[in-house]
Amino acid sequence: MGTETHDEEDASRSHDGRASPIDEGRASRIKAAAKQLFIDKGYDGTTMQSIADASRVNKALLHYYFESKDRLFLLIFREELAELSDTMAELWKEGGRPLTERFEAWIDTLVAFLERSPRLPLFIIAEMARNPELIKELIAEFSPPEHILSLADAKRLEGRGPGLPVLVELVEAIYSLILFPAVAAPMIRHFLGVDEALERGLRASQARLAKDLVRRRLGGDSTETGLREAMERGDGPR
């Protein structure tokens, strides 16, 4: 790396030998370089040395900032998924905004996320096969909380239908409507000749379909539907 790498060599220590504070600009540069490498080469194909080279720091400094590849990976992609995670968490809360509004906010956030990071869903799916435990840790906060899953189990035990709360069913359906076209985008472009502008239009159309599904599935004036009612109803309006 020459002079620049050597200049970074002692950046983790101040002149009096104490640990130097983290330089946020340098940390951001490292994360940007690492994110691109992870997406291009996958977790297994990316090394701390390749991240150090791409971000123009030496490997010792990289370890000083982020300790390990696992920690850097989780930090980067948790930040990428943070807004999605926040709006998803709103779905599971009792009270607050009407449930339909919360679903629509989550759908809008999902569409904006795909506009910003179109390659990320396919990357996460690929890494699920290669590094399932790491991805399981990354997406754990997207799972329904235990009280909802317990309710589904109780319904099965009581023989009351399939035991799939409406809320969980809707989340699964929305993922299918919004995420699948993003994951399948290369195939769709190839077979249907879809260009970028039409692809954006298709995403907007899928979002409208998802919102319409939410309104119909929750039934009636769904802006007043509560979380508990939605969780408990397994055979509501279609």
Image (cartoon, helix red, strand yellow):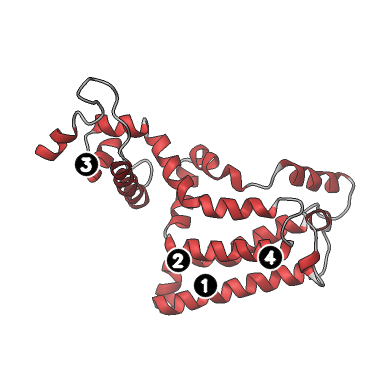
User: Where does label 3 land, which residue?
Assistant: 53
Quarter holding the N terminus?
top left
C-alpha separation, residue under disc 3 versus residue under disc 4: 46 Å
Q: Earlier in the sequence, mark 2 or mark 4?
A: 4
C-alpha separation, residue under disc 4 versus residue under disc 1: 19 Å
How crowded is the residue under tag 3: few (<14 C-alpha within 10 Å), some, or many (20+)?
A: some
C-alpha separation, residue under disc 3 versus residue under disc 2: 29 Å
* Circle 3 SS class: helix
Q: Nearer the viewer, residue 163 or 120?
A: 120
Name which residue type carries label 3: Asp
* Circle 4 SS class: helix
Q: Earlier in the sequence, mark 4 or mark 1?
A: 4
C-alpha separation, residue under disc 2 versus residue under disc 4: 21 Å
Q: Earlier in the sequence, mark 1 or mark 2?
A: 2
155, above or below 225, in the image = above
4 or 1: mark nearer the eye? 4
Give x and y (percent) for residue 102. 67, 61
Give x and y (percent) for residue 191. 43, 75
Name which residue type carries label 2: Glu
How crowded is the residue under tag 4: few (<14 C-alpha within 10 Å), some, or many (20+)?
A: some
Name which residue type carries label 1: Arg
Residue lying at 71% horizontally and 65% vertically, measured from the top left: 100
Name which residue type carries label 4: Glu
How crowded is the residue under tag 1: few (<14 C-alpha within 10 Å), some, or many (20+)?
A: many
User: Where does label 4 land, which residue?
Assistant: 101
Left or right: where 220 falls relative to 73 = right
* Circle 2 SS class: helix
Q: Which mark is residue 115?
A: 2
Give x and y (percent) for residue 228. 81, 53
User: Where does label 1 land, which residue?
Assistant: 203
